[in-house]
Amino acid sequence: MRPFSYARARSVDEVLTTLRDADVTLLAGGTELLNWARIGIEHPVRVLDVAGVPGLDAIEPLDDGGVRIGALATLNEAARDAHVAHRVPVLAQAIVKSASAQLRNLATIGGNPLQRTRCPYFRSDDGATPCNRRRPGSGCSALHGVNERHAIFGWTEECVATHPSDPAVALACLDATVVTEHPEGGHRLPARTFLRLPGESVTTDSVLRPGEFIVAVEVTEPAPLSAYVKVRERESYEFALVSAAVAVELDGDTVVRARIALGGVAMRPWRLEAAERNLVGLRIGSPQAREAVHGAFADARALSGNAYKIPLAGNTALRALQDAARQS
Ligand SMILES: Cc1cc2nc3c(=O)[nH]c(=O)nc-3n(C[C@H](O)[C@H](O)[C@H](O)COP(=O)(O)OP(=O)(O)OC[C@H]3O[C@@H](n4cnc5c(N)ncnc54)[C@H](O)[C@@H]3O)c2cc1C
Ligand code: SF4
């Protein structure tokens, strides 16, 4: 690991002033950044620790039934908050299924969607493995290599990776907003398109501008009938093979509105829009609902090792639909 300087910020103004310099890297929980420095994914020069900036860990109910979570709230603080648990259970469930209890005590909700892919070629520390995301122009080792955990949607020959965040999938399902500050003015960014697909960029994972700082995530609409299902090789401390976040509105057991986001299938949470449309008017658990969900995978493209993800993701979405409906 190369040496870097370290300083603590005490206010948002101080963060924004310091971010005017291009060589500054923010440190929140540090659970990703320090690993990157260790294996050479990033070589920070000046690290600015924002974890102690007052006020940015607040979790507040919004008047319309939603919730605002400060970017520096830890994953455990967010999952344990009563407003999060009652108003948007899908988010609390996705957080609890992330990482380990120890990591969730440090990892922040703002840092979580900025974690990098778990593609083993990207994480390799030999300094030479072809990987366009790590070494632009070097090729994609996963395209014809080990790709069991890679994408079935939105990939290009340049990169077939998936994004590993669980909370980002719930936030995309909930049509949440990522609230930012920037020396030139902040933005309100849709969580659905916060992460970039390989066709948009393979070197920059998110739409954040240089010097932009996440201050909160907001869900403006409550989703009491919502659930998160994560399928993984062991039941804890493991990334998703596939996952599904679902929020529904029902009339009896008939779908009035459905929102479905999948994890582990693309470089951003993947909204299953065809299923969302086709489920309206169908009964949860009916053969027609099953067809509406599995039929939405017509444009999925499997790699040599991951065709299993297509039926698995469909069944995971159906299970999440049933779990969401059961909350009523
Ligand atoms: C072993 C292991 C298992 C894991 N398993 C899971 C899992 O199952 N599911 C899951 O979802 N995640 C998992 N994670 C990822 C973990 O949740 C993330 O590492 C964590 O959420 C990142 O948050 P952080 O505060 O530690 O970020 P940091 O490491 O501090 O920062 C990460 C990046 O985000 C930037 N950053 C941080 N905060 C901000 C901000 N407010 N504004 C702008 N930029 C910011 C930093 O500059 C850095 O580039 C796992 C991690 C590990 C190490
Ligand atoms: S899938 Fe993406 S991250 Fe993995 S080797 Fe290919 S370019 Fe690199």
Image: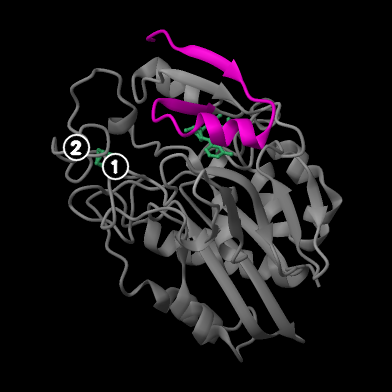
- Label 1 sits on residue: 203
* Lateral position of residue 116 relative to residue 289, left or right: left
Highlighted range, magenta: 1-26
Which residue is painted at 37% across and 24% down in the image?
A: 42
Horizontally, residue 34 falls left or right of residue 223, namely: left
Q: Quadrant of the C terminus?
A: bottom right
Visible residue check, residue 232: no
* Residue 133 in which image quadrant: top left
The magenta stretch spans residue 319: no
Tell me which amino acid carries mark 2.
Pro
Q: Would you say residue 2 sits in the magenta stretch?
A: yes
Residue 50 occupies quadrant: top right
Residue at (71, 26) in percent of width and height: 52
Tag 1 near tag 2, CB within 8 Å: yes
Relative side of 306 to 237, left or right: left
Separation of disc 1 and disc 2 at Cα? 7 Å
Residue at 74% x, 60% y is 88
Q: Secondary structure at mark 1?
A: loop
**Dot placed on the residue nearer the N-terminal end, 1 or 2:** 2
Q: Which sits in the foreground, 160 or 55?
A: 55
Q: Quadrant of residue 188?
A: bottom right
Residue 249: percent from left, percent from top: 70, 79
Residue 21 point in image, percent of width and height: 43, 29
Pick out the residue farthest to the bottom: 281
Q: Residue at x 42, y 48 (%)?
A: 206
In the image, taking residue 130 as reference, residue 272 lies left or right, namely right
Q: Which residue is mark 2?
A: 136
Vertical placement of 31 versus 176: above or below? above
Q: Is residue 195 above or below residue 127?
A: below
The amino acid pointed to by label 1 is: Thr
**Quadrant location of ligand 2?**
top left
